[in-house]
Amino acid sequence: MNAHDRDLAGQPADLAVLHYGDGEFVVLKPGRFVLCAVTRVKIPVEALRYWSPALQEAYASPVEATARWKELNP
């Protein structure tokens, strides 16, 4: 990775910024992927299926979504 692979905020240039709603999301900053809030794995935007509107977080799979729910609801 070189200086051209990052945007001005120090994030990878292909990192998308989304607003997560109920059943849909809105792209605020275009990019190729978002990061899973639990594992930090890259999730291609076109493959994103799991997120929390309340927490504004994306999850790689139902496993991570459930793990976050259990963490917040002991």
Image: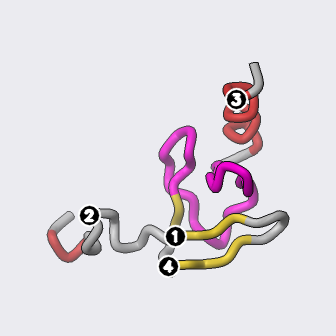
**Mark positioned earlier in the residue sequence (3 or 2):** 2
* Nearer to the camera, 54 or 17: 54
Identify which amino acid the numbered label 2 is placed on.
Gly
Disc 4 vs disc 3: Cβ atoms closer than 8 Å?
Answer: no
Image-quadrant location for residue 5: bottom left
Q: Which mark is residue 29?
A: 4
Q: Give the secondary structure at mark 1.
A: strand
Q: Amino acid at mark 4?
A: Lys
Foreground mark, 4 or 3, reads: 3
Residue shown at 68% from the left, 34% from the top: 68
Q: Position of residue 60 (x, y in %)?
A: 64, 49
* Image quadrant containing the N terminus: bottom left
User: Would you call the spot at circle 2 few (<14 residues within 10 Å), some (14-19), or many (20 or more)?
Assistant: few
| Cα–Cα gap, marks 4 and 2 | 14 Å
Pointer 2: what residue?
10
Residue under numbered circle 1: 17
Earlier sequence position, callout 1 versus callout 3: 1
Residue at mark 3: 72
Q: Which residues are magenta?
A: 35-59
Residue 48 is covered by the magenta coloring: yes
- Would residue 62 appear left or right of 2 to someone viewing this image? right
